[in-house]
Amino acid sequence: MDLTETHGHGAMTDGARIHWVRLDGDSPRQEDGAPAVVLLHGGPGLPDYLDDVAAMSADLAPVYRYDQRGTGRSPWQGRHTRKRHVDDLAELLDIWGVPAAVLIGHSYGTDLAARFCVAHSDRVAAMLLLCGPFVGDWRTADRAERARRMTPEQQERLRELENLIGRTEEQETELLTLSWFTDHADPERAWEWAALDALRRRPVNWTMNRELGAEGRSDPLGQHLDELAARLPRQTEILGGTDDPRPLSALASLASRLGVPLTRIDDAGHEPWLERPAETRAHVRRFVRAAVDRQ
């Protein structure tokens, strides 16, 4: 499959410049007014990392992804708010000439997708939520499972690194690796994947992480579920890995509350495209194809 990648920057109304990437295949569907796919990466505070997911459906519809403001190739200084990030996505859709998008969010990106849907439901043609959003008291189970996957020495070292002020590059890489290897189900490859991501998903914008995290705790998505349920597009689905340390039961409860289907990917963690690429690709392609065919 031949894919063409186009890069650009979008100027936001407050002066920020957002770096974006568009991936196109050679399907004639892209000439018939089909909606574009927009990927929303997690974090908050990480640069975009969803290139593998983008390639799964770019022959069915154009796929956009971007570095959220303050990350990667979208440098920005200022206070982060979830509303501003929702506004960024709306402004990017205008720049791309996309009236309504197929949103695919991962992790924190699912929270962003959900909040965007509440604010701009007319601009969401379909929504696929990968490994999130998690609402309610899910962190207790998450912490317990992560502790189970770590040795006492690893837990102690992680606490030491978290408390350091002014970490070196090596210490930052070690911190991220220890924080992320428990995201994966496969113990043979978990450390390898986390160590690679600790080098590639840099730098982490810890200020953005703290500010958006604090706002999410003071105004949790769980308080807006009735509004979200009323504004969801007809085609909305949740997908989760059965071995994500974040409890799949929380996604099951959310899916029931919203009245949407939940797909479980067996033997996969928080990034199912790594551990079960064929199953994840098949689901993403089925979802995007259905959204394109509906138009």
Image (cartoon, grey):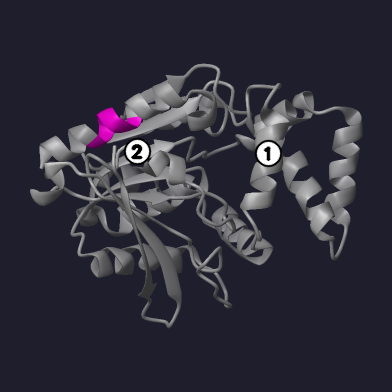
Where, by quadrant of the figure, is residue 208 drawn?
bottom right
Quarter holding the C terminus?
Answer: top left
Q: Residue at x 71, y 26 (%)?
A: 145
Horizontal side of residue 81 vs 155, given as left or right: left
Quick one: SS at disc 2? strand
Q: Residue 36, percent across and down? A: 24, 50
Quarter holding the N terminus?
Answer: top left
Q: Residue at x 41, y 27 (%)?
A: 280
Main secondary structure along the magenta-highlighted residues: helix
Query: How would you rate the neighbour count of disc 2 (Cα within 10 Å): few for under 14, some for 14-19, many for 20 or more?
Result: many
10 or 127: nearer the eye? 10
Asked if residue 285 lies in the magenta stretch, the reply is yes
Kind of residue indicated by mark 2:
Leu
Which residue lies under the disc numbered 1?
194
Where, by quadrant of the figure, is residue 93 drawn?
bottom left
Residue that sits furthest to the bottom in the current view: 15
Relative vertical location of residue 235 with respect to residue 203 in this rendering, above or below: above
Relative vertical location of residue 67 with respect to residue 285 in this rendering, above or below: below
Q: Residue 155, percent across and down? A: 85, 36
Q: Residue at x 55, y 55 (%)?
A: 216
Relative vertical location of residue 56 with respect to residue 266 in this rendering, above or below: below
Q: Which residues are magenta?
A: 284-288
Horizontal side of residue 2 vs 134, given as left or right: left
Q: Residue 120, percent across and down? A: 27, 58
Q: Between label 2 and label 1, give the one nearer the viewer.
A: 1
Q: How many marks?
A: 2
Horizontal side of residue 26 vs 12, given as left or right: left
Residue that sits furthest to the front in the current view: 2
Which residue lies under the disc numbered 2?
128
